[in-house]
């Protein structure tokens, strides 16, 4: 479904040029770009947009915001129809809001939030009205849309920053679990403070890095007990990073509610 508008007679801070969703997108070629700000989001299928000789794939739940007059072209890819939602808008506030978004010629959103995904279907009927009061309401909705874009971009940046902390920790533990590992050692790996890295890690994994390390060691100990019946308990302990067998037995018992010897006896 697509709704197109004429430019309002009265100057507006934000106004809708066109809006639509579940649109079967055909190929488009614009040498001089579009005259308004243009949001394009894939619902299903896929497409490619080319800007300044750079091709950008738009898979489901991905979108792009284009500045006016930026030359571009886009077309469907694959055998399925490319279903999209879109919003084109302009107004006296757009330039400052674009700066707020840190918008260059375009802004790609690689993971569109649920709020952004449902925004156009939810407000479509509100845009199907040209009454002056309705135009003011539409201006408010476009402002909300821009704030959702900003929020979405910030959340994606945080996810990237979080992975910059958690991924090195996970890799280090997987490669060095048999060695002594401390919070301070992990902080050298991530280049973040112990307090910050532990807070980020716990938010994603519901446990601290050292709790994850114990969990990892217990699973490795279980594997060794199952696959190496001739290994003594103290050898198993040493191979998973416990140089005190008594401490290993205590941790194993807390984790599995049985001792390593008892576990091995009944497998």
Image (tube, rainbow, N blue to C red):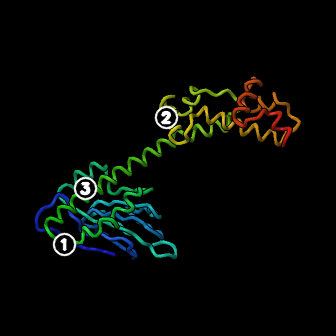
Q: Where is residue 29 in the image (x, y as percent from the top left)?
A: 35, 72
The relative height of residue 9 versus residue 167 in the rendered view (above or below) is below
Look at discs 1 and 2 and give the one toward the viewer: 2
The crowding category of the residue bearing disc 2, from other C-alpha atoms within 10 Å (few below 14, some 14 to 19, many at least 20), is some
Between disc 2 and disc 3, whose residue precedes? 3
C-alpha gap between disc 1 and disc 2:
51 Å
Kindly identify which residue carries mark 1. 6
| Tag 2 residue | 199
Nearer to us of marks 3 and 1 is 3
Q: How many labels does the image show?
A: 3
| Above or below for 27 versus 56 | below
The quadrant the N terminus occupies is bottom left
Query: Which element is circle 2 on?
Result: helix
Label at residue 143: 3
- Determine if residue 62 is in view: yes
Badges 3 and 1: C-beta atoms under 8 Å apart? no
């Amino acid at each position: 479904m697509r709704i197109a508008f004429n430019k309002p007679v009265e100057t507006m801070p934000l106004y809708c040029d066109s809006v639509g969703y579940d649109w079967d997108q055909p190929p488009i070629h614009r040498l001089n770009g579009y005259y308004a700000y243009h949001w394009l989001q894939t619902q299903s299928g896929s497409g490619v947009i080319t800007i300044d000789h750079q091709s950008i794939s738009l898979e489901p739940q991905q979108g792009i915001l284009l500045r006016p007059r930026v030359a571009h072209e886009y077309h469907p890819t694959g055998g399925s129809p490319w279903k999209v939602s879109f919003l084109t808008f302009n107004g006296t506030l757009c330039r400052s809001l674009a700066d707020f978004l840190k918008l260059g010629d375009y802004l790609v959103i690689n993971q569109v939030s649920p709020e952004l995904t449902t925004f156009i279907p939810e407000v479509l009927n509100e845009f199907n009205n040209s009454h002056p009061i309705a135009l003011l309401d539409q201006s408010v909705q476009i402002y909300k849309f821009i704030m959702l874009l900003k929020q979405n971009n910030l959340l994606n940046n945080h996810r990237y920053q979080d992975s910059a902390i958690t991924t090195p920790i996970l890799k280090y533990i997987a490669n060095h679990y048999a060695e002594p590992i401390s919070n301070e050692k992990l902080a050298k790996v991530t280049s973040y403070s112990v307090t910050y890295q532990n807070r980020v890690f716990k938010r994603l994994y519901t446990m601290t890095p050292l709790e994850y390390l114990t969990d990892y060691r217990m699973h490795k100990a279980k594997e060794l007990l199952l696959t190496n019946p001739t290994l003594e308990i103290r050898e198993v302990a040493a191979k998973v990073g416990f140089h005190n067998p008594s401490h290993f037995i205590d941790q194993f018992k807390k984790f599995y509610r049985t001792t390593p010897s008892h576990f091995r006896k009944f497998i």
